[in-house]
Image (tube, rainbow, N blue to C red):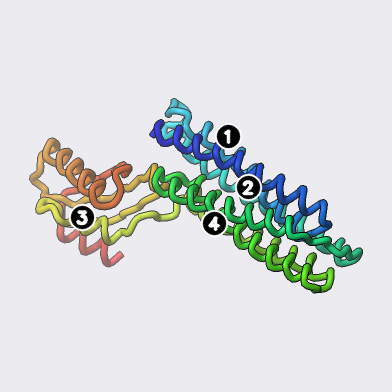
Amino acid sequence: MEKNFIKVKRVLWILLFANLFVAALKLIMGTLINSASMTADGFHSLSDGSSNVVGLIGIKLASKPIDEDHPYGHRKFEMLAGLFISLMLIFVSGRVIVEAVMRLIHPVQPQVSSESLFILLFSLSINLFICIFEYKNGKKLNSQILISDSMHTRSDIYVSIGVLITLAGLRFGLPAFVDPLASFVVAGFIFHAAFEIFRDNSSILLDKAVVDVDQVKRIAMSFDQVKGIHKVRSRGCQNDLYIDMHILTEPNLSVEESHELAHLIEDKIKQSINRNVQLIAHLEPYNEKEVMEDFEN
């Protein structure tokens, strides 16, 4: 687990410098050519860098070891960091909308140059690399913060493509109001990314089910000593997954045999579903009459 956190930190540091470089290019060029959409895209890229900083803080807190007050560890700090990133994006989206409205009221014709289009195309290629690199590492390391941040960067790619098309159109004679209108589209993508990040991280914090109950039942029922399974629950994330359930067993099993059975079921679940599973099993003696009453209730 500790090695994973170190690798996630390394990825976030690389992405931080890459995002700050891209944001600087867009903001400087957007200001020079008076483009609201390109400046908005620059702020979006700047929020990418800010989210990397939040991610680094979240990972540092999440990597703290288990203590007396936190027997399940501090892993959920990673999800809290993801929620903070989504709030940052909502703020950036609002800022872009306000700037676009002001440009509609007081229109300015952007001075689009070949250099500005080249810079935007160059930054787009960097964002594409960042998104693929971050998402692959997020999946490989089972890091929710990297996956959330890659979704943020993915929206940045769509935004940059839209801005590139808009600026190219302005260069070939489209009216000035097209630029702030494109900013509204930018704001929409930013808000959508914020919603996706909020949804994914809040579901973990609210203990949404994360495994297929039927699959867990099939695994447990593959053991001859198991006569029934009920009250299966799961929570957590791929790197920190908990499953608890009630297992009905042969009544004559000893405590030692029941203990061994629970471990065998956990091992098989780890092999079939996720190696990070921690199983909490409540073993009960099988009684057909009681089982029928449970089903009726």
Q: Amino acid at mark 2?
A: Asp
Query: Which residue corresponds to the image point at 62% horizontal and 45% vertical from the top-left?
Result: 19
Labels 1, 4: front one: 1
Q: Is residue 194 visible?
A: no
Disc 2 to disc 4, C-alpha distance: 18 Å
Question: Which tag, 4 or 3, sits closer to the chain's start?
Answer: 4
In the picture of the structure, the residue carrying the numbered disc 4 is 199
Name the residue rendered at 54%, 39% in the picture. Answer: 12
Report the amino acid beneath label 3: Ile
| Residue 229 coordinates in the image, percent (x, y) | 23, 56
Real-space CA distance between mark 1 and mark 4, rounded to the nearest whole angstrom: 21 Å
Label 4, label 3: how many angstroms apart (C-alpha)? 30 Å
CA neighbours of label 1 inside 10 A, class few (<14), some (14 to 19), many (20+): some
Q: Residue at x 47, y 38 (%)?
A: 8
In terms of depth relative to the viewer, which is nearer, 201 or 108? 108
| Residue sitting nearer the eye, 273 or 229 | 273
Q: Tell me the quarter of the picture where residue 103 sits.
A: bottom right
Between disc 2 and disc 1, whose residue precedes? 2
Front of the two marks 2 and 1: 2
Can the viewer see residue 232 in this picture?
Answer: yes
**Residue for badge 2:** 48
Q: Residue furthest top?
A: 68
Query: Which comes sooner in the sequence, label 1 or label 3?
Result: 1
**Disc assigned to residue 219:** 3
Mark 1 or mark 4, earlier in chain: 1
**Mark 1 against mark 3, which lies toward the viewer?**
1
Q: Residue furthest right?
A: 106
Circle 1 is placed at which residue position? Answer: 57
Q: CA distance from mark 2 to mark 1?
A: 15 Å
Taking 118 as reference, is 134 left or right? Answer: left
Q: Quadrant of the N terminus?
A: top left
